[in-house]
Image (spheres, coloured by chain):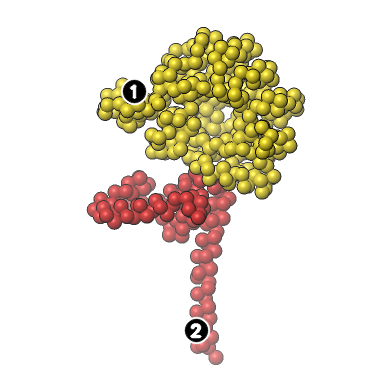
Amino acid sequence: MSTTPMAPEPAEDCGCNDLFGRTLAEQRLTLARGDTQTLQLNLGFLCDLACRHCHLEAGPQRREVMSRETMAEVIAFAKRVPFAVIDITGGAPELVPGLDHLLRSLAPLTGKLMLRSNLTAIAEEGRQALLEVCITHKVAIVASFPSLNAGQANAQRGGGVFERSLETLRRLNALGYGLPGSGLELDLVASPAGAFLPAGQAQAEKRFKRELADKWGIIFNQLYTFANVPLGRFRAWLEKSENFDSYLGSLREAFNPCTVDGLMCRQLVSVAWDGTLYDCDFNLAAGIPLGGERKHVSQLQQRPEAGTPIATGEHCFACTAGSGFT
Amino acid sequence: MDPYYDPKDLSRFADIAKDAPDLGKKFFEYYGQVFAEGELTAREKALIALAVAHTVQCPYCIEAYTKASLEQGSNLGEMTEALHVVTAIRGGASLVHGMQMRKLAEKLSL
């Protein structure tokens, strides 16, 4: 457990230089690493979309992608240190050369291999072979699907993305994804189309399941609802639209101390496209490396030690709002 | 003179309990329970509250339940339709009273 009680201490004496750290101190909580069982790989910032809420400012103009050499170092690390879950994200990882080899190499090394998809890059011409690798190795697909409303979804992700996403979901269902007993998991991720907090996950999942099935004949396994993180392109929009202070205020007001134990950063190590290690994808976006200094995946001989403090910033409020981001 | 409505007052709503704490406590407990998930979902309740907020023309409530409706997953189309529901009822309530007018006028007229 990371949320060890500490002696009562005034916030101004906690030594924290960020609001989130001060809030933890006020609640007598600490945020430290637990048993690191998830390896997250961010293959880079290249993406076919330029979503307005993207904390990484990913887009078609970005050129930072994981090289085959770094992929080999990641595979070697996963052989040295087994992880229960390996979670591949981006950008759009589907656009990174060598993804199919990476999936084939990592699948036997972990209990669960996940691929995050924006539902457009995976449907481009020439991706059939990649889909076959995913099916063969039972790769779980975790797809962005922010809203059941085309206007909201397209405002966040770009014109026509909602309709293309529906087509891809139908195609994934036709391949067996999301179908009971297929062993092919299809999960959706919904994040708000604006400067407001997400709906409760359980109720939203019921509604998404009902409406996607009734209106479009689509089924999926689980829905995750996440708050948008005030970094990157989303932060720039918050500032430009003069929503930043009120949004951060909403996140702070919704701080739920019960979420701290289950935060994903406690059990995850994130490897960036260039091999640098981070506590999570948001610290990657914020440029705060694991342990406070840049370290390469090839230098890591074992999983990060339990009890190691996790670097925080004001963006961390997005993961502790309401029921949290786990 | 300061405006009668100050947006900052919304976040100070709980202060209303200061000089009548028992009543304040009961009201806020009741309020919290009303908006909890029940036979109606939290999303449906937020849409009802949004529509009523426009009927009673409460700017605090409009702000609170616009945000709550979006947070519960509603979209602007649904929110606008909810306003038309209360507009129809409000307008209909005026018009249906026309039956009183008609009855009286018919009684008084040759």
The chain letter of the red chain reads B
The chain letter of the yellow chain reads A
Depth order, front residue of A20/A56: A20
**In this rendering, position of residue A123 left or right of residue A287:** right
Q: In which quarter of the image is residue A140?
A: top right
Q: Position of residue A109 (x, y in %)?
A: 61, 18
Depth order, front residue of A148/A63: A148
Image quadrant in which the N terminus of chain A is located: top left
Q: Where is residue A188 in the image (x, y as percent from the top left)?
A: 60, 36
Q: Label 2: few (<14), some or many (≥20) within 10 Å?
A: few
Residue flagged by tag 1: what amino acid is it? Cys
Residue visible at 35% across and 30% down in the picture = A23
Q: Position of residue B79 (x, y in %)?
A: 54, 52
Residue visible at 61% across and 35% down in the picture = A187
Circle 1 chain: A
**In this rendering, position of residue A46 left or right of residue A176:** left
Comparing labels 1 and 2, the label whose residue is closer to the camera: 1
Circle 2 chain: B
Residue visible at 68% across and 19% down in the picture = A104
Residue indicated by mark 2: B104
Q: Can residue A117 be seen in this view?
A: no
Q: Is mark 2 on a helix, strand or loop?
A: helix
